[in-house]
């Protein structure tokens, strides 16, 4: 594991971790499709290298927020910023991981992971070795030559994760990436995510409707409800499986569930 | 190859043989029951005429002439149809500019363009290629347009968030994703092309299978007319099979069910089933193997 992580991160990141990730921000932004704004007055700042989870009921605009950060949707009002500059469009710096199948079905898992590298113009041999290294890291070495529909849903999401991280993006935006997986696979995927993010220094915005997932992964949790970001809370002891009975964590969990329920 | 595909080929051959047998029976007995087969050439007449033609030069000249015309026209139609289809589906400006013209021209049967071809082109040859091309162009255009519009938006968004531009999206998402639909259009197109190349040859050609068939008709040489028809049928079958094969090869990534048309005959044979009454792993492995075999056979469907 450690050797493969070195081969992947070493050429890209001579700078210290904290500088690697991007700072993302919304300033009194209105988000949504042109004819249907869903979020209003969004003021949110994501620090470099931070993991911010976003929770809210389905249809509340979580995905819209993420798509705006990815550059797929322009904000309807206010601004979205990357490192202090207004966000203008999609960029390889900000990788997006989708909930549903976003792997290209005519490419093998390896071919899918190689795609962002090919777009960046990485030479073929290096593309191949970096893709193989990432597939090994997410435990898909054996399935590398398979087409996406030949492997399980969990394996497809792992391949998507490898594809998103292959080009060492400075931010990873994740749209309920484990939402369609069963509970067992899901917690395995969360551990894997924590493991592969370690050392990348990337800023992560992770959207989910699962409060426990949000509390496990996030340094902070943003709550979305009734058309606005209603609260942003610090999470005590993030990414620590033993912290679920920590009284501070339990209180936060209760708070979030109450505010989502109302 | 196992026994099953062989028996399927046998069945297919038998189907052709039965049709020929019925033809021979009706014509040699001079059946005249409202439908009149008495003037009809028998299979043996046609076979004799065929053998005679095969040994002559004309037959092969006609064949290569027709094939050259259809392949040129069809290749042009494939390229133009895919290009225009993608353009119209992806650009609103192109849709507004080209859409109305295309929709007005589309309902005109390609063969009705013979006067246009005569006016436009210096030689008959180019006119025939033009008509063949126009015939195949519209099926290819329409199915490409639909296939491109039906692409899953997530694929394009994924490539955009990797920093891919328009060309990259075209090459990595639009064309490969639309390929199954495009080949639907190409399959229809090659059929329409044959209809039009033969008709055009009948009207204005010099040499070519259609021209020869019509010539034989004007001198009341019915067995040779049938030789022409059989030739068209066989050539059409070969070319559409080639298009189908190429399509299957290029869209091998499509998830295919192991559905087999003759499902009922594929029930597990009683010999194998009682040997493994419980669902032990070996049995499962076997049935998986079976599933793969079925998938293989499903892939062989193009030979129909």
Image: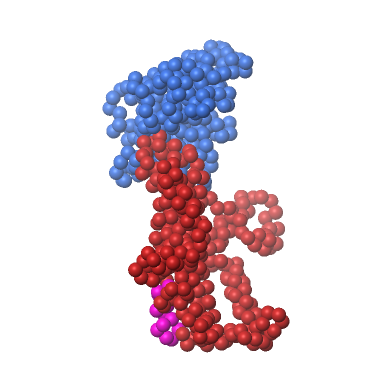
Chain colours: A blue, B red
Give coordinates of residue B249: x percent, y percent: 46, 58
- Majority secondary structure of magenta residues: helix
Residue B84 within the magenta-colored segment of the rendering: no
Res A252 visible: yes
Q: Nearer the viewer, residue A29 or A135?
A: A29
- Tell me what residue is drawn at x 48 percent, y 23 percent: A31
Magenta range: B54-66
- Quarter the C terminus of chain A occupies: top right
Rendered image quadrant of residue B259 = bottom right
Residue that appears at 58% across and 53% down: B257
The residue lying toward the viewer, choosing from B217 and B112, is B112
Residue B223, above or below A77: below
Residue A196 visible within the image: no
In which quadrant is the N terminus of chain A drawn?
top left
Question: Left or right of B61: which side holds A226?
Answer: right
Q: Position of residue B194 (x, y in %)?
A: 48, 68
Residue located 64% across and 50% down the image = B280
Q: How many marks?
A: 0
Residue at 56 percent of width and 59 percent of height: B298
- Along the horizontal axis of the image, is B188 left or right of B24? left
Q: Position of residue B140 (x, y in %)?
A: 47, 56
* Front residue (pair A34, A139): A34
Q: Is residue B58 magenta?
A: yes
Q: Nearer the viewer, residue A40 or A171?
A: A40
Q: Residue B162's image quarter?
A: top left
Q: Is residue B248 above or below residue B50?
A: above
Q: Position of residue A139 (x, y in %)?
A: 45, 39
């Amino acid at each position: 594991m450690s050797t493969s992580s070195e081969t992947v991160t070493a050429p890209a990141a001579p700078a210290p971790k904290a500088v690697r990730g991007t700072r993302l921000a919304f300033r009194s932004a209105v988000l949504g499709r042109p004819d249907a704004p869903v979020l209003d007055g969004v003021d949110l700042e994501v620090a470099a290298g931070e993991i911010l989870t976003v929770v809210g009921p389905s249809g509340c605009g979580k995905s819209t927020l993420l798509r705006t950060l990815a550059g797929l949707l322009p904000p309807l009002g206010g601004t979205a910023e990357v490192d202090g500059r207004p966000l203008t469009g999609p960029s390889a710096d900000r990788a997006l991981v989708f909930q549903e199948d976003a792997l290209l079905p005519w490419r093998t898992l390896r071919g899918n992971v190689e795609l962002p590298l090919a777009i960046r113009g990485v030479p073929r041999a290096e593309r191949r070795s970096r893709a193989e290294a990432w597939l090994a890291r997410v435990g898909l070495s054996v399935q590398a030559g398979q087409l996406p529909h030949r492997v399980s849903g969990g394996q497809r999401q792992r391949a998507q994760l490898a594809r998103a991280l292959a080009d060492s993006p400075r931010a990873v935006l994740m749209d309920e990436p484990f939402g369609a997986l069963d509970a067992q696979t899901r917690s395995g995927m969360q551990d894997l995510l924590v493991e592969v993010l370690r050392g990348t220094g990337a800023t992560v915005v992770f959207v989910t409707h699962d409060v426990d997932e949000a509390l496990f992964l996030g340094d902070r949790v943003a709550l979305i409800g009734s058309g606005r970001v209603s609260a942003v809370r610090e999470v005590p002891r993030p990414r620590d499986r033993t912290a679920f009975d920590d009284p501070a964590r339990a209180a936060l969990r209760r708070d979030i569930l109450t505010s989502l329920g109302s | 190859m196992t026994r099953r595909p062989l028996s399927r080929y046998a069945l297919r051959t038998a189907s052709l043989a039965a049709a020929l047998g019925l033809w021979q029976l009706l014509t040699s007995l001079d059946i005249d029951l409202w439908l009149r087969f008495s003037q009809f050439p028998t299979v043996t007449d046609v076979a004799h005429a065929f053998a005679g033609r095969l040994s002559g030069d004309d037959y092969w000249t006609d064949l290569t002439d027709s094939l050259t015309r259809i392949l040129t026209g069809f290749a042009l139609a494939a390229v133009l149809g895919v290009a225009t289809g993608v353009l119209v589906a992806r650009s609103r400006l192109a849709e507004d500019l080209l859409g109305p013209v295309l929709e007005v021209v589309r309902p005109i049967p390609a063969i009705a363009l013979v006067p246009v071809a005569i006016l436009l082109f210096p030689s008959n040859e180019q006119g025939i290629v033009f008509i063949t091309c126009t015939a195949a162009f519209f099926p290819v255009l329409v199915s490409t347009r639909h296939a491109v519009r039906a692409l899953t938006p997530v694929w394009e968004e994924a490539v955009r968030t990797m920093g891919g531009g328009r060309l990259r999206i075209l090459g990595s998402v639009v064309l490969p994703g639309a390929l199954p639909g495009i080949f639907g259009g190409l399959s229809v197109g090659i059929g329409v092309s044959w209809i039009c190349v033969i008709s055009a040859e009948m009207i204005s050609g010099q040499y070519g299978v259609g021209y020869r068939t019509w010539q034989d008709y004007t001198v009341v040489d019915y067995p040779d007319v049938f030789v022409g028809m059989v030739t068209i049928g066989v050539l059409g079958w070969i070319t559409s099979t080639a298009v189908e094969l190429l399509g299957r090869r290029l869209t091998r990534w499509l998830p295919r069910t192991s559905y087999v048309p003759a499902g009922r005959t594929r029930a597990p044979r009683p010999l194998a089933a009682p040997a493994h009454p419980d669902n032990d792993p070996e049995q499962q492995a076997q049935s998986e193997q079976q599933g793969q075999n079925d998938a293989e056979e499903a892939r062989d469907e193009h030979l129909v």
